[in-house]
Image (spheres, helix red, strand yellow):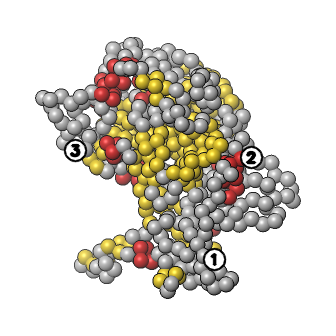
C-alpha cells in the first residue's frame, strides 16, 4: 500500500478514554478524557522507537487506531487508546478506514468453554477503504479485554491495530448507616476465593465492617487517601507487543487492496533466518522491538503510567494483555502476585503445522483459586490480571513476617525503616563537583520486572536492557504505628508485642480453603 504523510509520534504519552452513558464512577475527578462516543480513524504511522544507532534510524511503521475526536483528540500511537467503561453502558463508536484494505474493530468474548469459540462482544464488520461506519454495543461484564482488528489474522492485529478495553463493575449499592459486607473487586461476579482475597486487603476488621484482616494492613483496593495523593482503584495496563520494522515496512508497501499472506507473515515474523551474506542482528524480518504500551527500556521502566509507584499497604491491579505472536514469561521482583483472571482463547497460528497455542492447565475466567506466583507465562492473545499486594519486600528485614506492621528493631539492629538501603548515596554524601553537591540518595527502592524470554530484553537485536521491562517502586510505608512513614524520615522504634516478644507471622491463608 502507498505511504501517506506519516504521523511522527514520540515515546511519551499514555492515552486513556472513559466512555459510556456517564463518566465511570471509579474515575470521577480523574484526569481522563470523558466521552459518550468513540471516534477512531484506522490509519498508519511511523513511530520513533527506544534506541537509535548506526544500524538503522530506530523508526517503525505501524497501522493504528487513532482517536479522531474533534475536541482534544489524544495523540496517535500504537497501541490505541486505553478504553474504560462501566459494564452495561451503551457505547457508540464511529470508525473511518483510511487504509487500502478492509479493516474492523473487534472485541472477543471471554472464553468459557475451551472446546468452543467464544461469542464476540462486538464486531464492527469489515470496513471498506475510505468508508465510515457507526455502531453501538454495550460494555461487557467487568474485566480486561483486548480490542483489535480480527481480519487477515494475525497480520492486521500485529501490525498495530489493537488496544485495551477495560470494563469496570457498577458502583456497589450502599445502604445508609450500614458498612459494606464485602469490598470492591474488578469483577461483577468474583469467585469466593477472589472476593476473599480483596476482602483481606486493608485495615484490620471491625465488628461493624466484617471485612478485612491484618494480613495486609493499609488500604483496600478501592480506597484512596488524599493526604498522600493515593488514588482509589489503583490499576495499570501492560499491553505487550513485538515489532519488526523490516517486515512492517514490507507489509506497508504491499500491493494496494491485497491482504499480505498471513502464513507468510507468521513464518517471516517468527522464523526468518539471518542472511549469511549480511549476518547483522536486525537485518531480517524477526522482531527487533519488545514493548509494553508501546514503550520499552527506560521509557517503560520509568513511566509512572506503567511502573507503579506506591507505598507498602497500597495494593494495585496490573492488567496484562499480549497482542503479539511471542509468549512472554513475566517475572516481577519484590512481591509475589495473585493471578485473579485468565482469558486465553484457542488460537491457531497460520504456518507450518498449524500450531495451536494454549496452556491446558489453566482455568479460564475469574479464578476459582488464584495463583500466587512471581513468574507467569502469557501466550499470544492471552489476557490476565495480577493483584500486587504491595507488601514489604521480603529482602527488607522485619520482625513479624513479610508485609506486617512491625518493630524497627530486631535484636538491637534497626531494620525498618531500612536506612542502610535508603540512606545509601552514590557518590558518597559530601562529594562535590566544584561547589555543587553531586551525591544521589538511592531512594525510593526500585525493583525490576522483566521477561524470562531473554531476547525480549534487547532492542534492535542487541541493545540490552532496552526491551520489555518495567518494575515496581516503593516510595514509603503505610504499615507503621501512627500512620504513614515516608522514606527518608527519622528512624522509628516500636514496642514489641504485649508480652515483649516479637513473633513472626504465619503464612497468609490459602484462598482456596
Residue 171, which numbered label? 2
- Mark 1 burial class by Cα count in 10 Å: few <14, some 14-19, many 20+: some
Image height check: is 346 above or below 498?
above
Name the residue carrying label 3: 53
Secondary structure found at label 1: loop
- Res. 354 image quadrant: top left
Which dot, 2 or 1, sits closer to the camera? 1
Pointer 2 local density, CA inside 10 Å: few below 14, some 14–19, many at least 20: few
Q: Is residue 429 above or below residue 2?
A: below
32 relative to 21 in the view: left or right: left
In the structure shown, which secondary structural element does the residue marked by tag 2 occupy?
Answer: loop
Relative to 467, 27 lies left or right: right
Disc 2 + disc 1, Cβ < 8 Å: no
Q: What residue is shown with label 1?
A: 481
Q: Earlier in the sequence, mark 2 or mark 1?
A: 2
Tell me: residue 456, above or below residue 125.
Answer: below
User: Of callouts 2 and 3, which one flags the residue occurring earlier in the amino acid sequence?
Assistant: 3
Q: What residue sits 51% from the left and 76% below the top?
A: 416
Q: What distance separates the C-alpha of mark 3 from that of mark 1?
A: 52 Å
Q: Tell me where residue 278 appears, x and y as whole percent.
A: 15, 31
Number of marks in the rendered image: 3
Q: Are there few (<14), some (14-19), or many (20+) residues within 10 Å of tag 3? A: few
Whole-percent x, y for residue 445 in the image: 44, 66
Mark carried by residue 268: none
Amino acid at each position: 500500500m502507498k505511504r501517506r504523510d506519516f504521523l511522527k509520534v514520540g515515546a511519551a504519552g499514555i492515552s486513556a478514554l472513559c466512555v459510556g452513558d456517564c463518566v465511570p464512577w471509579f474515575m470521577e475527578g480523574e484526569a481522563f478524557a470523558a466521552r459518550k462516543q468513540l471516534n477512531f480513524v484506522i490509519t498508519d504511522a511511523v513511530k520513533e522507537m527506544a534506541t537509535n544507532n548506526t544500524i538503522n534510524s530506530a523508526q517503525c511503521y505501524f497501522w493504528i487506531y487513532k482517536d479522531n475526536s474533534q475536541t482534544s483528540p489524544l495523540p496517535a500511537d500504537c497501541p490505541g487508546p486505553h478504553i474504560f467503561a462501566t459494564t452495561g453502558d451503551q457505547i457508540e463508536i464511529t470508525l473511518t478506514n483510511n487504509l487500502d484494505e478492509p479493516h474492523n474493530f473487534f472485541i472477543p468474548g471471554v472464553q468459557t468453554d475451551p472446546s468452543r469459540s467464544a461469542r464476540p462482544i462486538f464486531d464492527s464488520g469489515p470496513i471498506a477503504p475510505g468508508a465510515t461506519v457507526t455502531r453501538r454495543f454495550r460494555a461487557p461484564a467487568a474485566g480486561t479485554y483486548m480490542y483489535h482488528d480480527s481480519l487477515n489474522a494475525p497480520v492486521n492485529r500485529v501490525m498495530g491495530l489493537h488496544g485495551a478495553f477495560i470494563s469496570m463493575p457498577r458502583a456497589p449499592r450502599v445502604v445508609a448507616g450500614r458498612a459494606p459486607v464485602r469490598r470492591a473487586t474488578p469483577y461483577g461476579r468474583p469467585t469466593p476465593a477472589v472476593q476473599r482475597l480483596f476482602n483481606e486487603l486493608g485495615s484490620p476488621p471491625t465488628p461493624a465492617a466484617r471485612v478485612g484482616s491484618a494480613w495486609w494492613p493499609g488500604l483496600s483496593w478501592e480506597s484512596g487517601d488524599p493526604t498522600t495523593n493515593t488514588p482509589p482503584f489503583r490499576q495499570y495496563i501492560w499491553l505487550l507487543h513485538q515489532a519488526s520494522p523490516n517486515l512492517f515496512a514490507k507489509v506497508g508497501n504491499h500491493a494496494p487492496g491485497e491482504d499480505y499472506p498471513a502464513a507468510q507473515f507468521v513464518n517471516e515474523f517468527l522464523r526468518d533466518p539471518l542472511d549469511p551474506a549480511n549476518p547483522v542482528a536486525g537485518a531480517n524480518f524477526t522482531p527487533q522491538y519488545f514493548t509494553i504500551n508501546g514503550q520499552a527500556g527506560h521509557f517503560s521502566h520509568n513511566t509512572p503510567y506503567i511502573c507503579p509507584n506506591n507505598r507498602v499497604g497500597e495494593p494495585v491491579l496490573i492488567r496484562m494483555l499480549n497482542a503479539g505472536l511471542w509468549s512472554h514469561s513475566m517475572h516481577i521482583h519484590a512481591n509475589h502476585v495473585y493471578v485473579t483472571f485468565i482469558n486465553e482463547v484457542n488460537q491457531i497460528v497460520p504456518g507450518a503445522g498449524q500450531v495451536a497455542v494454549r496452556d491446558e492447565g489453566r482455568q479460564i475466567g475469574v479464578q476459582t483459586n488464584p495463583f500466587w506466583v512471581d513468574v507467569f507465562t502469557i501466550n499470544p492473545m492471552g489476557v490476565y490480571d495480577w493483584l500486587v499486594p504491595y507488601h514489604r519486600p521480603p529482602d527488607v528485614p522485619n520482625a513479624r513476617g513479610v508485609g506486617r506492621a512491625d518493630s524497627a528493631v530486631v535484636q538491637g539492629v534497626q531494620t525498618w525503616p531500612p536506612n542502610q538501603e535508603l540512606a545509601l548515596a552514590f557518590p558518597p554524601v559530601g562529594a562535590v563537583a566544584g561547589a555543587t553537591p553531586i551525591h544521589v540518595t538511592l531512594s525510593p527502592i526500585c525493583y525490576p520486572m522483566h521477561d524470562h524470554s531473554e531476547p525480549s530484553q534487547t532492542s534492535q537485536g542487541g541493545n540490552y536492557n532496552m526491551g520489555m521491562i518495567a518494575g515496581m517502586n516503593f516510595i514509603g510505608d503505610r504499615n507503621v504505628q501512627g500512620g504513614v512513614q515516608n522514606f527518608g524520615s527519622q528512624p522509628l522504634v516500636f514496642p514489641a508485642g504485649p508480652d515483649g516478644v516479637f513473633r513472626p507471622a504465619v503464612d497468609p491463608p490459602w484462598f482456596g480453603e
